[in-house]
Image (cartoon, rainbow, N blue to C red):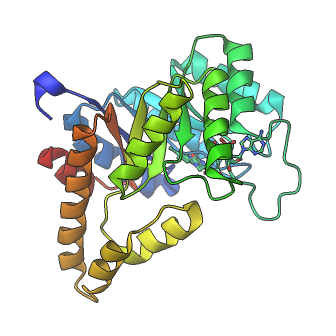
Amino acid sequence: MASRDRRAISFEFFPPRGEEGREKLMEVAKKLQQCQPEYVSVTFGAGGSTQQGTLETVLDLMRSGFAVAPHLSCIGSTRSSITALLDQYRQAGVQRIVALRGDMPSGMRDAGDLHYANELVAFIRQHSGDYFHIEVAAYPEFHPQATSATADLDNFARKVAAGANSAITQYFYNVDAYSRFIEAIAARGVTLPVIPGVMPITNLTNLARFSAMCGAEIPRWLRLRLEAFGGDAEGLREFGLEVTAKLCQQLLQAGAPGLHFYTMNQSAATLRLWQSL
Ligand code: FAD
């Protein structure tokens, strides 16, 4: 991005498994450091074993010089466990949190003390005041469990009213969905920065699996073009990154305040996209 028009970019990682994964992630992060991200974020597994991994990864990345935003989900957690984490993060110098409801892991019965992200945002504000910059999730194509588009927009406005500072979207491949979302929240008086989440297209099987889970649409034309590559993984990747680069450009032209890249703990695709901007 040209320096006169520098919009914030950020990268998302997940906690790696084992020592080898940890070393590999640090190499990936080092390569991405040249992009000067505003911050990097680390995902969090609701009620699961990755919670300790999130904290360790956050600390590793902070030691490497990044500003880091841990994701924090409330489903299945108690107020006291959330308080303990918030205090740990604050003590470590974390200044930004991505606050989420999360999803109940299969087999877990107790939904915990806080049931929706707006309750978590309110709880963080109650516990830590204005200390943290709070990001929340936004769904331009709507959350898969939302009873209607209107109900989902109302929920988003509730999260903002509870004290969110900015939002990161679920990934999508339809610029209009983003622009319409911004218009719809503005009509509700909500004007905070909403940063598009960008999933680089490099592999159709994985993309189709994630998209089915999170409700992100792969447009028909795109799915058919990707399917046509068959076993030509390299051809698919080239085409997929070209499509994703165009999406990024269109989003910035449409006024997006920045881009948040779902790196999948890989550097090559994200670096390519960054260079294309
Ligand atoms: P909410 O905003 O609480 O919304 C969840 C659903 O409930 C929506 O359908 C909403 O319309 C509805 N709703 C909200 N409030 C009410 C209410 N009062 N009454 C009735 N319905 C209501 N998941 C993880 O487990 N770990 C992560 O690290 C993680 N990171 C993410 C990062 C981003 C940028 C995004 C977009 C998603 C991430 N997720 C993560 C996935 C997220 O946890 C799921 O999409 C989850 O299902 C919803 O979380 P939320 O914070 O959007 O929930």
The answer to whether any part of residue 208 appears in the image is yes
Q: Where residue 155 sits in the image (x, y, percent)?
A: 67, 38
The C terminus: image quadrant:
top left
**20 up-or-down from 96: above or below:** below
Taking the spot 66% from the left edge, 37% from the top edge, the residue there is: 154
Q: Quadrant of residue 12?
A: top left
Left or right of residue 171: residue 51: right
Q: How many marks?
A: 0
The answer to whether any part of residue 262 appears in the image is no
The N terminus: image quadrant:
top left
Taking the spot 54% from the left edge, 23% from the top edge, the residue there is: 189
Taking the spot 27% from the left edge, 39% from the top edge, the residue there is: 254
Q: Nearer the viewer, residue 125 or 149?
A: 149
Taking the spot 34% from the left edge, 51% from the top edge, the residue there is: 175
Left or right of residue 178: residue 31: left
Q: Quadrant of residue 144?
A: bottom right
